[in-house]
């Protein structure tokens, strides 16, 4: 496996934070700090901030993502946003299957799979989140859980499309809790995900897919996590809301 074969992707997940003026302030602060980044820099923002983010990042190295999309193209789905609506705006990335969506909004591997395929069909790059609950880790079934998610969430996704996806390994117990997985725990599961991809799609695809770690990654622990062979980037929640912290993580990715 060769880390040089894939680009590191550092993506901020703003969750339900920032009004438009606040978003403008954060993006303006971030732009000069990440301008010379060697990795892909993405900010995934609430729908209400997409237009602001797209216009403020025009001509910069910052890419814009959404935090979810629906699997149908259009229709009677009040409150939902389709993948085509996002691509039409110029959005490039979309987070799919975040644990908060699974936990609070009833997302299942089936809907994650449908949303992933809809995002790919619309030309978006999905950042698909997988990860175990604390209870599942304690029961020693982390690989079983994550392996099942990889199989189901990417069911029927072609090898060509798989290469366009980013996978975020986010142990649910580490998200927003201040508890980070140890570098060894994070690397172990990211390596397992790559093995699983190799079994499903072959080594070439497994080598090409960027696998992020997410779960309380911050300015202090990013470098150690990102130095690991199978950790190609990060999905960053809390620390992506502070421009200097986010920029430090981006720098740590090279
Ligand atoms: C996330 O929202 O995906 C995340 C990892 O959050 P945090 O960095 O705050 O744990």
Image: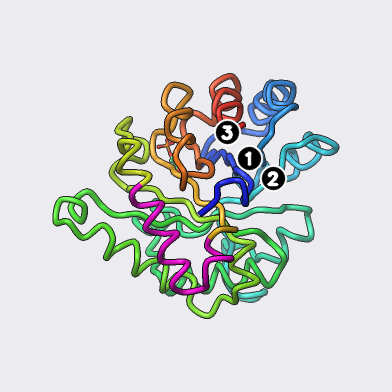
Task: Please name whichever residue, 14 or 105, is drawn nearer the observer in this view of the structure.
Answer: 14
Location of mark 2 (residue): 64
What residue range appears in magenta?
A: 188-206
Residue 21's spot in the image, x, y percent? 68, 28
- Element marked by disc 3: loop
Is label 3's Cβ within 8 Å of ligand 1? Answer: no
Which structural element holds mark 1? strand
- Tell me the residue that label 3 is attached to: 253
Q: Magenta span has 190?
A: yes
Residue at the right extreme, as displayed: 59
From the top left corner, tell me how far across and down residue 137 is, in percent: 21, 52
- Label 2 secondary element: strand
Quarter occupied by residue 173: top left
C-beta proximity under 8 Å, tags 1 and 2: yes
Tell me which numbered mark, 3 or 1, is placed earlier along the sequence.
1
Q: Which of marks 1 and 2 is nearer the N terminus?
A: 1
How far apart marks 1 and 2 lie (CA) works out to 5 Å
Number of numbered discs: 3
The residue wearing badge 1 is 43
């Amino acid at each position: 496996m060769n880390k040089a074969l894939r680009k590191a992707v550092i993506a901020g997940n703003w969750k339900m934070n920032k009004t438009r003026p606040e978003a403008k302030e954060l993006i303006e602060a971030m732009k000069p700090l990440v301008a010379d980044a060697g990795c892909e820099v993405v900010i995934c923002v609430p729908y209400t901030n997409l237009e602001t983010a797209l216009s403020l990042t025009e001509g910069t190295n910052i890419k814009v993502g959404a935090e979810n999309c629906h699997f149908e193209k259009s229709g009677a789905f009040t409150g939902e946003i389709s993948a085509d609506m996002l691509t039409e705006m110029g959005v490039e990335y979309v987070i799919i299957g975040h644990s908060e969506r699974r936990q609070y909004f009833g997302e299942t591997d089936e809907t994650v799979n449908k949303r992933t395929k809809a995002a790919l069909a619309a030309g978006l790059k999905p950042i698909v989140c997988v990860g175990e609950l604390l209870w599942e880790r304690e029961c020693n079934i982390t690989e079983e859980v994550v392996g099942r998610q990889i199989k189901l969430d990417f069911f029927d996704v072609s090898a060509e499309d798989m290469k366009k996806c980013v996978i975020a390994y986010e142990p649910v117990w580490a998200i927003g809790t201040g508890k980070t997985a140890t570098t060894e725990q994070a690397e172990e599961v990211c390596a397992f995900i790559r093995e699983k991809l190799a079994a499903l799609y072959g080594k070439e695809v497994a080598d090409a897919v960027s696998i992020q770690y997410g779960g309380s990654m911050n300015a202090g622990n990013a470098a150690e996590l990102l130095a690991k062979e199978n950790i190609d980037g990060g999905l960053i929640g809390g620390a992506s809301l502070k421009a200097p912290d986010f920029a430090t993580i981006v720098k740590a990715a090279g």
